[in-house]
Image (cartoon, rainbow, N blue to C red):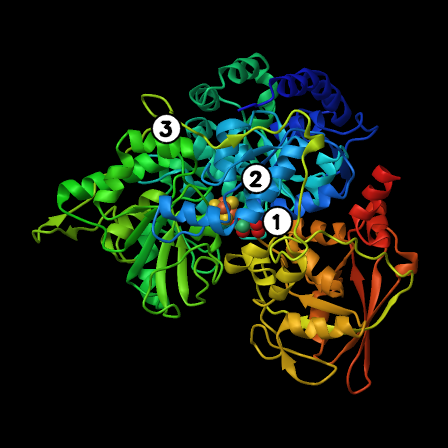
Amino acid sequence: MAFDLSMIQATYDRMGARISAARQLTGRHLTFTEKILYSHLWADLPSAAYQRGTSYVDFAPDRVAMQDATAQMALLQFMQAGRKQVAVPSTVHCDHLILADTGAAADLASALDKNKEVYDFLASVSNKYGIGFWKPGAGIIHQVILENYAFPGGMMIGTDSHTVNAGGLGMVAIGVGGADACDVMAGLPWELKFPKLIGIKLTGSLSGWTSAKDVILKVAGILTVKGGTGAILEYFGPGADAISCTGKGTICNMGAEIGATTSLFSYDQKMSDYLRGTDRTEIAEMADKIKDHLAGDPEVYTDPDKYFDQVIEINLSELEPHINGPFTPDNAIPISAFAAAVRENNWPEKLEVGLIGSCTNSSYEDLTRSASLAQQALEKGLKSVAEFTITPGSEQVRFTAERDGILDTFEKIGGVVLANACGPCIGQWARHTDDPTRKNSIITSFNRNFAKRNDGNPNTHAFVASPEIVTAMAISGSLCFNPLTDYLSNDKGIQVKFEEPKGLEMPLKGFEVKDAGYQAPAEDGNQVNIVVDPNSNRLQLLDPFSAWEGTDLNNLKLLIKAKGKCTTDHISMAGPWLKFRGHLDNISDNMLIGAVNAFNDKTDSVKNQLTGEYGSVPQVQRAYKKVGIGSVVVGDENYGEGSSREHAAMEPRHLGVRAILVKSFARIHETNLKKQGMLAITFADPADYSKIQEDDKISISGLTTFAENTPLTVTLEHQDGAIDSFQVNHTYNNQQIEWFKAGGALNIIRKQMIG
Ligand code: MIC
Ligand code: SF4
């Protein structure tokens, strides 16, 4: 599938010299993360070591990966950059736009029909610019990447927050917005703040019901949704080596939920086995030769406190299966305490649906471990009481699982196999329910469980667990069932109990696939024509944003003061809106419709300061835009948590919001805002959040002398004439200040490329 051996070899050739130089520069031993980072610097080594958490560094990633929902915007931007071909190997994966309804075959056929225009666009842009194209049905981006492109010691960026999954194969793989991907594909460096390093030492070993997922569910409980911000998590220790490669992928995958820049494991036997098992023996052999470079120095792991900013130790032998939720992925509850938590919190006990799959948990191992429970159910006279769905991660996994009778086992207990795609994980789910607003519970092996994410119903309590736990709970139909200890009554009224799940890391007969779904680009794409219908409601060519006017921003209106969690799902909802991901104006109609207005506790209801009437957020903002008045969005902690979707930054930019002022930002979202020429600022004193009133006029000063490490000032003119003024901080460096001035990073690239 065209993994690029010469690119991997070039990376490996560079590593030795870079690592020794970095050891000299820092004067100490290196973690694996640092070895990869220093080997991927855009320029030569600096004269002084980087400060973690402070220094901005230019990197040269080896690859770019894009999924269909974000690729549209990334490629629309790339088309403006004026290049003939992408500068680094890149791929597009069609996985987000397939609606799960009745089952794989019918759902895929209907997606091909409904999304034809978008798929054709992505296929032809890929073909023109030398980008590998994975067709709808080929699988979920991160599984396909793990199976085909990830390699130990590499660096990749991807336009999806779960790009981090590739850390399971020892890669520094980082989720970014499309504008970042566009830079790298255009041959420019990619900038990241040198991360802090968190070491996670795993001792003991997983057994029985506990699986890789439980490691990250536990870590999420310890670090919370903000705890990984600005950091890379490096897993090590005897417990790490025994986890399968896809299990390592699961752990790294959900690092996105704690805000981590990425997570990774050192190269080991399990990775070597996986490379060989997925037809990449050459890469395993190349990696074996430079094994020492593909792990932290041994001294680091014997004395981790000296090398990491924080160290967490988890004894896998003592780890229980966990269930996290509802509404946030960091509410971690061990299974032994879960039934009590359900009753105490009055969460609906009846389990309506169990869903296994998603990029986090859809490997062959995941499916076999779950199928072992389904098989037991069959033998013990049980069927799935709850609705039960299964999404294989890739066509290769699906084809092999079908061959090995695994899918058949699921179907026999009532399971429905969905297309190899994101499906319900991203709200692409035609849920079959008699009441779409009812308070109810579902459990998934996915990663996110924010309100409304899966089915649009704010009353759906979504819990996240391992596929094994999901399968057992679905069979029982109850959220209070603990498969480790509890009995179920079978079709003859006899009490039966599950034995521990068992699985296979990789198929005994090897993986097999007929058509993996890959389409290579044309050698010379010059002749390929890209047509975007000007009347399309799904695709719209971009107009450049206008440059900064050169003055402070005065008399802006408050658009919304958002209260509490405001994730990218709140700012730019997915599900039904995914269809507009290539049409900025149309998708802007979902801007912030999920955010809670602090003044009336309602969603999508804000005061139009021109009329005094309440309207939907996008409507009110369009009214301001019409008369040329800018506005400000105010938010709480970790604003923009979750996805990499840059629509959450482009929509406010497009509709005329001038600044986002919050207590703190999630990393990818903050960068996305900067890239689009938006002002992203934080309260120097978070308590100033309470000074913002509904009818405020807001001015931001200090912009004419906008400089690194220099705060700006916000002045509020309240309705009664009173004035409040306070300091706000920003993290713009000189280059990012240029983006702001030019009206967006792309305006600068275009000038450089086209002249
Ligand atoms: C998600 O899981 O939220 C998504 C959909 O995969 C996003 C990307 C997107 O919004 O398209 C992500 O995680 O980055
Ligand atoms: Fe797809 Fe869900 Fe993974 Fe996002 S988290 S890439 S929506 S499967």
| Residue designated by label 2 | 163
Q: Is residue 354 above or below residue 301?
A: below
Q: Within 8 Å of ligand 1, the CB of disc 2?
A: yes
Residue closer to the observer: 57 or 738: 738
Query: Can I make out residue 329 in this image?
Result: no
Identify the element where label 1 is drawn: loop
Q: Residues within 10 Å of mark 2 (few under 14, many from 20)?
A: many
Residue 644: numbered disc: 1
The location of residue 365, given as percent across then percent down, is 36, 33
- Of residue 362 and residue 686, the one placed in the foreground of this image is 362
Q: Is residue 507 above or below residue 607?
A: above
Q: Which quarter of the picture shows residue 86?
A: top right
Relative to 606, is 544 on the left or the right?
A: right
**Badge 3 is on which residue?**
505
Q: Are marks 2 and 1 in contact (CB under 8 Å)?
A: yes
Whole-percent x and y of residue 316? 40, 36
Q: CA distance from mark 2 to mark 1?
A: 10 Å
**Kind of residue at badge 3:** Glu
- Amino acid type of disc 1? Ser
